[in-house]
């Protein structure tokens, strides 16, 4: 019997779609735009953000929501503004070949879905640029009249929480695991890779490579996202 054609592909965002310039993980965390923002806010902000990673690795948080809340306090403490936030978010480039890959997938009637523990504002770029049909991102910021951070919306959208969104989308589309694929790069993507029939680690953590169906390993600075296409049944 022929293998079912892939109809839905799930993607991680940080380090998979977008090249945030980070590859070093800390404990059981994955490199993310949270760290990029902390770096831009200054040395002290970065040091405090690193402390939250220690707490996460030591299981001192009840869950991902608590971890995000703690990090958001750092953003407020060091004066994150709307203009500064979007300057950083919009400065992070796509990996080469991302837009072309998404266009090819859509031409093959494959639905695109992103599940990320990062920022909704960044995911919105992928919606506008590449036509993602479903996006789940962990944090969305809201600003006051002075462009200061006022409120935020958080979703438990990382580690095991990502799996709940994945299963929901699969159910809504009436698709089985062998009709779905996942592309990611971090150790926090391991639960996702184990749910679908085809999983691809894109220049990612060795722990993720160990559980994925396929791995793409390219020289730093020469990454090309189109390398995932053959593993999705597209030549």
Image (cartoon, rainbow, N blue to C red):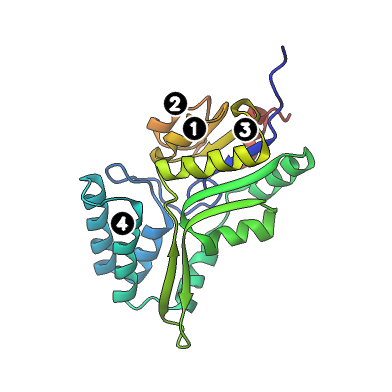
Residue at the (68%, 30%) spot, across then down: 6
Residue identified by numbered label 3: 180
The answer to which image quadrant residue 109 occupies is top right
- For the residue carrying disc 2, how many other residues have a C-alpha within 10 Å: few (<14), some (14-19), or many (20+)? some
3 or 1: tag closer to the N-terminus: 3
> Residues under labels 1 and 4: Cα distance?
23 Å
Give residue 211's mark: 2
3 or 4: tag closer to the N-terminus: 4
Residue at the bottom extreme?
146
Q: Quadrant of the N terminus?
A: top right
Residue 228 percent across, percent down from the top left:
62, 34
Residue 53 percent across, percent down from the top left:
27, 52
Of the pair 168 and 21, the residue shown nearer to us? 168
Residue identified by numbered label 4: 67
> Residues under labels 3 and 2: Cα distance?
16 Å
Q: Are marks 1 and 2 in contact (CB under 8 Å)?
A: yes
The answer to which image quadrant residue 38 occupies is bottom left
Give residue 54's mark: none
Q: Quadrant of the C terminus?
A: top right
Give residue 193's mark: 1
Of the pair 170 and 1, the residue shown nearer to us? 170
| 68 relative to 176 in the view: left or right | left
- Secondary structure beneath dot 1 equals helix
- Secondary structure beneath dot 2 equals loop
Residue at the right extreme?
107
Q: Are marks 1 and 4 in contact (CB under 8 Å)?
A: no
Residue at the (42%, 52%) spot, across then down: 156
1 or 2: tag closer to the N-terminus: 1
- For the residue carrying disc 1, how many other residues have a C-alpha within 10 Å: few (<14), some (14-19), or many (20+)? many
Which callout, 3 or 2, points to the residue nearer the camera?
Answer: 3
């Amino acid at each position: 019997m022929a293998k079912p054609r892939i109809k839905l592909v799930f993607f991680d965002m940080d380090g998979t779609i977008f090249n945030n310039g980070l590859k070093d993980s800390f404990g059981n965390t994955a490199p993310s735009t949270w760290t990029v923002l902390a770096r831009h806010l200054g040395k002290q902000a970065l040091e405090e953000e690193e402390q939250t990673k220690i707490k996460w690795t030591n299981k001192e948080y009840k869950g991902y929501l608590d971890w995000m809340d703690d990090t958001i306090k750092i953003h407020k403490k060091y004066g994150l503004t709307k203009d500064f936030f979007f300057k950083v978010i919009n400065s992070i480039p796509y990996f080469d070949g991302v837009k072309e890959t998404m266009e090819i997938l859509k031409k093959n009637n494959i639905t695109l879905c992103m599940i990320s523990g990062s920022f909704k504002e960044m995911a919105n770029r992928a919606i506008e640029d590449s036509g993602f049909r479903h996006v789940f991102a962990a944090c969305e910021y809201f600003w006051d009249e002075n462009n200061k951070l006022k409120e935020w919306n958080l979703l438990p959208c990382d580690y095991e929480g990502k799996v709940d969104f994945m299963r929901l989308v699969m159910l809504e589309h009436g698709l089985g695991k062998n009709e779905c694929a996942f592309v990611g790069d971090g150790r926090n993507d391991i639960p996702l890779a184990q749910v679908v029939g085809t999983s691809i680690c894109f220049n990612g953590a060795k722990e993720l490579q160990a559980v994925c169906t396929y791995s793409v390993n390219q020289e730093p600075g020469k990454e090309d996202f189109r390398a995932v296409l053959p593993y999705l049944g597209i030549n």
